[in-house]
Amino acid sequence: MSSRPPDPPLPLESLFDAAPEAWVALHLHSAQAASSDSMNALARLAEIAGDFTSRVSLEPPDAVLLEVRGSFRLFGGAQGLSRQLLERCRAAGYAPHWSLAPTPLAALVLARAGQGIIVLARDRLVGLLAPLPLALLRWPDAELERLDSVGVRTLGVALRLPRAGFVRRFGPKLLLALDQLTGAAPELRRPVACRERFRAQVEPAFELQTVALVLQHLEPLLKDLEHFLRTRQSGVDLLKLRLQHRKHPATRLDLRLATAEAQATHFAELLSLQLSRVALPAPVLRCELRSGVLQTLVVRSESVWRPGEYGGGAGRESPALIERLRARLGSDAMYGLCLVPEHRPERAFGIVELNATPSRRTSQAWCTTRRPLWLLREPEVLVDAPRELQLFEGPERIETGWWDGRDVARDYYVARDHSGAEIWVYRERLPPHTWYLHGVFG
Amino acid sequence: MGQANCDTTAEPSLERLLEHPAIWRGRSVARAATLSTGFTRLDVALPGGGWPAAGLTEILTVRSGLGELRLLVPLLARLGAQPPPRWAVWVCPPFEPYAPALIAAGVPLERQLVVRSAEPTWVIEQSLDSGGAALVLAWLAPGVATSVTVLRRLQLATQRSSTPAFLFRPLTESMRTSPAELRLIFEPQLMGGCVRLLKSRGGERRPLELRWQELNDVAT
């Protein structure tokens, strides 16, 4: 059983909005609609429509409706908007029939009739609809036949029928449809659900041998991604790239960003840095790009100066540094520091994954005795320690950790070695009482 | 009347012109921007009264961990407290920077960024150019190519970004020339160290002996 995602809720404003609406219907040609991927075509049209308005609705199997009243000013009126919309559709390889009308159903009917017209006034609407055949409403065949048998074949005639008799014979549903056609009753349309992840792939005609070629083929995908993100006013902080080879397992790359970003050039720069570290095991057959979860994009103004110049925009550049370093060196190459409340010296500090910007939080010092600035990763055995070293502080006894099996029992001293450097050494309390170098006061 | 005015203002304006940081006249003290080291006597000895605020400083020691890092702890603490949060980048440190000691010295841990890489010079330049770093500390392993060209590139990056960078290098490098703004040799001593300026634009030539206690005196 396919589980459909729940329908998105109806937009609240449509319930209260009494302002006149202007709907554009894009109706696919029967040839395009009949093809197997008509849903794909509709989704693509809805994508395009999303650039013009946020109120887009699907009318399967072959039409997309969009409410564009609020966008008139931006796109140069009804004329300008429909022209630009159709140009975009044509550029994407579709040539839909279209119409603009004050109600969605009227726009749909006019588009189905193949009339590319713009009607904004409701009182002109009935006159334009009247000569059109009733079949354009796509009512059930049985009802249409009954209407046909009483001589009702056009919309105009149907609209002139007495309402009470119409309800009695054909039911309230059809009357409501007629009312919605003229705008006498409102029609609520479900908005199309936005895709929440970006996913695109490119299959070049030939195998890609070099990283540079891969990047070149990724460029249009990144452009699409930028557009995808811009229409949603979002950014992503994770991109997954999958490069398929003929025989080898696919090469996978995760690009993690410090903050959500939406710029294709920024992605391309970081990807090229990251790809420069990767050795392709074989030529690439297919590239697939997927985004992580979309995040709200906080748009900031760019600094006039170059980063760092005249102290320009320091807060902004910190994430960029982390991203660039991470892209080129990998996440393991860099870390931040934190404090752990723990008596064992080697466990009293932690390594933390880096945030985008240095945080403003401060941690409190809890250890009161002197500690060295440097710690050795592994304590180093000191042979012949008592004779070479000059101990002058200590002992500080640290004996703890018996509960987790990594117990320590040590006496720590501050000492000076032959070159005069201050070092931090300890002596195991258990035989054979080995001496170790653990830190350097630096 | 106008003539006289011209004459009196001519000399001060020439003086002011010559004070420009880009102009350096022989042994006169350069007027470049500096950052206080936290040690009063070291400040006096250094040209301009502190570490160069934009420039490469080389600290040469026989080996790592002799106390040279302690020269910079006051600076790390002070820059860390400054308002726009920026990173203190540690490039390829020889040991692990030990958090409890840093926090005890007042260095904010959240702003420390440790990077280990086989290409330290690239990391240094990126950090400087990003503007996201308050200062850069770097330890260049003997294997890393540090030609004069590389160092000059880094020196230019520090000036472009007005960010200080400190290179810790072995004492053997003192024989070779370097485009760094300031070069000094550090030797450990009892409870302190000895600083000798190898190259500076008009700093103190005599060796300077520092006690770690002095820092506490200044702080209190």
Image (cartoon, rainbow, N blue to C red):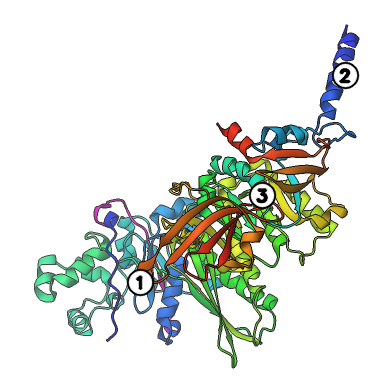
* Residue A261 appears in view: no
Amino acid, disc 1: Leu
Q: Chain of mark 1?
A: A
Q: Which residue is mark 2?
A: B11
Determine which residue is flagged by label 3: B67
Say which amino acid is labelled 3.
Gly
Identify residue for label 1. Answer: A58
Q: What residue appears at the point 40 percent right and 80 percent down from the top-left corner? A: A39
**Picture quadrant of residue A341:** bottom left
Q: Is residue B129 left or right of residue A101?
A: right
A299 on left or right of B129: left
Asked if residue A321 lies in the magenta stretch, the reply is: no
**Residue A436 image position (x, y, % from top left):** 57, 64
Q: Which residues are magenta?
A: A15-30
Q: Label 2 is placed on what type of residue?
A: Glu
Q: Are marks 2 and 3 in contact (CB under 8 Å)?
A: no
Q: Gap between marks 3 and 1, in whole Å?
A: 72 Å
